[in-house]
Amino acid sequence: MIISTELENSTFEALINRFLKTKVGVVDSFLSEEIVLRLRQNLINLYEQDRMHPAGVGNGAKFHRDPENRGDQIFWLDRKHKSASENEFLDLIDSFVIYLNTTCYAGITGYEFHYALGELCVYLDGKDVRISPEGGRCVFFKSSELEHEVLPSKSPRMSLTGWLKKG
């Protein structure tokens, strides 16, 4: 069983509280500098090895590629890759899910994450809020309730993107 540390719990709590106040929780210290550097290098290696894939829109039967609206590239994380840095990140997500389910009765039963290249834009209360991918930053919002998109960038913007799932 994964047990989160006191520091992780305070980070999780800060993220949840900001989400509850503004519908978009942002915490800049979600990931340590060490894991950020290892994940960044992993993403660079994937890009240089041409293992990134064009992103699409929708899922399941509704999935399609739409380069005009979504031009970023992705690579899905999976424990089967046996990547120590990816697994360390996924362990932290496991701790966050346990924390959410224990403290907020969220009912989260799964998740999925991928590396991404792009800048997030969330449309909140009639304003577009651009959130750049900074090392260690975590952004938490209900994607089913807030319109959002990944913007093309003029310089490399590396991030991890994911969904927490119910049911």
Image (cartoon, rainbow, N blue to C red):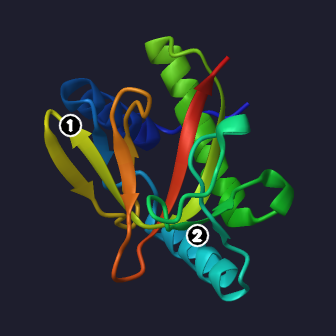
Question: Which quarter of the picture shows residue 19?
Answer: top left
Distance from the alpha carbon under mark 2 to that under mark 1: 29 Å
Q: Which residue is mark 1?
A: 124
Depth check: 101 or 54 in front?
A: 54
First along the sequence among labels 2 and 1: 2
Q: Tell me residue 81's x, y (percent).
A: 82, 62
- Mark 1, other Cα within 10 Å: few <14 / some 14–19 / many ≥20: some
The correct choice, above or below, for 102 with respect to 39 in the image is above
Q: Are marks 2 and 1 in contact (CB under 8 Å)?
A: no
- Mark 2, other Cα within 10 Å: few <14 / some 14–19 / many ≥20: many
Instruction: Please tell me which residue is depicted at 54% across the width and 58% down the height of the picture.
Output: 66
Q: What amino acid type is highlighted by mark number 2?
A: Leu
State the SS at label 1. strand
Instruction: Please tell me which residue is depicted at 62% across the width and 49% down the height of the picture.
Output: 113
Identify the image quadrant of the N terminus.
Answer: top right
Depth check: 21 or 149 in front?
A: 149
